[in-house]
Image: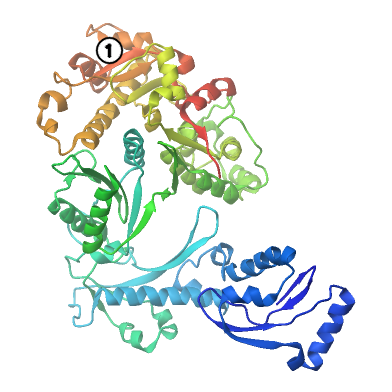
Amino acid sequence: MSVFFEGGVESISEMPTKDNKQKLMIYKSETNTEENMLKIQEDSMKDEQQAFHTVETINEKDAYTLLELNPENREKTENCLMEEMEKPEFTAEDFIPEPSNEFALVKMPEGKIKHEWIQKCIVEMRVLIKENTFSLDHLPEEDEKVTPTKMTFKAKINSDGSLDKCKARLVVRGDLQAEIPGDQWSPTASFRLLRRFIAEAARTGKSIKQLDFISAFVQAVVKERIFVKFPSCLKKYVPEDLEKYFDRPLKLNKGLYGTTHSAKWWWEELNDWLESDNYECSLSEKCLYVKRWPNNRWLKIINYIDDMLYFGDSEETEKEFEKAIGTRFRVEFKGAAHWYLAARITRDKSDLIMDQSRYVKNIIKRYDNGKIIIKNTPLNPDTVFTKNDCPTNEEEISIVQKEYGEIDYRSAVGSLIYLMTGTRYDICFATTKLAKFCNNPGKVHYKALIWLLGYLKQTANLGIRYYHNEKNSPLGEMLIRNNILTEEEEITFSDSSWQDCKDTARSTGSFATTCQSGLIDYASFVPDPIAASSGEAEYNTASVAAMSVLHNRYVDLEMKNLGLEIMNNEEYTIPGGKDWKPSLILLDSTAAISMAESARSTSRTRHIDRRFHYVRQGQAAGRHKLSWISSVDQIADIGTKAVTLAALQPIMKLTYVEVKD
């Protein structure tokens, strides 16, 4: 390596490292002309002993002293050397795309990348064997099936796009395993619970921390006889001590990813330990736990399989929890939470922000066919979808595929559904409409999809902000401007478009619930009955919203009060009780509000499906209260139709903020 600078040239054959002592070969020159540099190189080739002197066993700190650089160039040269030393051996691009399975790995050309993936496979096998995951002492009965396993590969990327780590995981072939009797369901934290959890952290002014369970399923005991076998194509790559595990059945002692009941066994293992340590599990969300101590200390937890978020009243409480769970399980403590379920969590003073900006950019990168143009709305306001837009014969299908075939419509819509479910309520209407045509999309649907991608390209850096003091938020200021006062922190907006579906004459409804001025729950849907009026459509939608509101209230009660004596007070916890504060639902339809407030049966209401009278029953019982808000400030409006830019912008200012990359 040669480093050129104004004072001369330094040639270093071996770079000093931070932790090791090495020989440093230094050539000193006092010239700075190109001619002299060339002469120096010729002289060094003739008599290397004269040109170099060896400084043995020196530290990195001493290396720069021996370079004897010109002081004004020292800093520039040192930076150059350090950049060279810190340059990573691999980058994220080296490992993406990952091998699809072990057969794809074997077919990779020989080189460092293939060698690195193979080493990850060996590490995975050694960890499983060390954890006593397999038993060699048992053989299957005649009626017991031996299920093949496969390797999956994942390169994890940091928020800045750099390579975090590469991981290989041995999983059971789910399509080939024998059926195990019994329920295999296990709870996982939903995006709705995650958003509510972040809102609670913002309310209390706490920072959320994160931990990962290392090979979570392997830490759970298998409760059935299951036999598996290793992928035979990897045998030639493993060390001799691992060869005995190939070409034979292995009985599972611990859970393995891919087995139908592993998730359930793992959740039971974790749940049993938490409850034995006096954590109370929520009845509304089985992945929410709260523990309280006599001296007003508390800790709140949500868990998604092997990823856990938590925060407590103090750092002391959090450390006590970390010590306890680290003793029982193998975990990796991540510190402050930054990424969870492909969503980024950032803190701004006492407020918390959740966004999926990187996920949006990955979607655009994946499906950009060169036709994506920046758009300011999710859909063209004039767009109306009907089944007549779908191709009806093979010729029409081939024409559509010829023009738009480079975009996988179903895959793109699936990605948008995950984004919509996570943080982007503004694309709810567009995504749900596009999803209806996944089996047979036409040109209109492809054009709408490309339009939506163009909108996301324009608005990639949008996030939901949860305010410590919601009165200082744009939403809080809007409520004050409309003289809307409530003691409850959760507020729900409900709206509907009447008979907007040209094929069925059904009406699209939508609701959005906020807490700490950030969205925690929302949906866009089409109720089954055909509404005879816009007021009836709003009434039906309000009923669906009211059902969701009650669930969110239960979660809110448990998240705040689980473990407290007040939870035993039915007047406080039972909807409609003396101490129950009605939930606020805001509509821009006075007709729907009147229908909910009156039990009178008329020719315009007596045909309504009984289940939609839930909103009327709840209003009478004091579970919730319907109030009016102007259409301009009706947040749920963007979930019911393809809105114009003039209608979209005010709502976006109330619900989203711009985030940094």
Return the residue at label 1. 596
- Is residue 498 something one can see in this rendering? no
Q: In the picture shown, does residue 266 fall above or below 628?
A: below
- Density class for disc 1 (Cα within 10 Å; few <14, some 14-19, many ≥20) is many
Nearest to the observer: residue 135 or residue 183: 135
Q: Tell me the residue at 16%/65% (across/down).
A: 223
Q: How is the image coloured?
A: rainbow
Q: Quadrant of the N terminus?
A: bottom right
Q: In which quarter of the image is residue 507?
A: top left
Task: Pinpoint residue 145: horizontal percent, then vertical percent.
Answer: 24, 72
- Is residue 555 something one can see in this rendering? yes
Secondary structure type for disc 1:
helix
Task: Pinpoint residue 591: horizontal percent, then vertical percent.
Answer: 35, 9
- What amino acid does circle 1 point to? Ala
Task: Pinpoint residue 354: horizontal percent, then vertical percent.
Answer: 44, 40
Q: Quadrant of residue 444?
A: top right
Nearest to the observer: residue 621 or residue 609: 621
* Left or right of residue 401: residue 189: left
Q: Tell me the residue at 35%/36% (across/down).
A: 205
Task: Pinpoint residue 62: horizontal percent, then vertical percent.
Answer: 60, 76
Q: Quadrant of the C terminus?
A: top right
Q: In the picture shown, does residue 637 fall above or below 337?
A: above
* Left or right of residue 491: residue 113: right
Q: Tell me the residue at 19%/34% (across/down).
A: 561
Q: Tell me the residue at 87%/79% (across/down).
A: 36
Nearest to the observer: residue 33 or residue 287: 33
Total marks in image: 1
Nearest to the observer: residue 482 or residue 61: 61
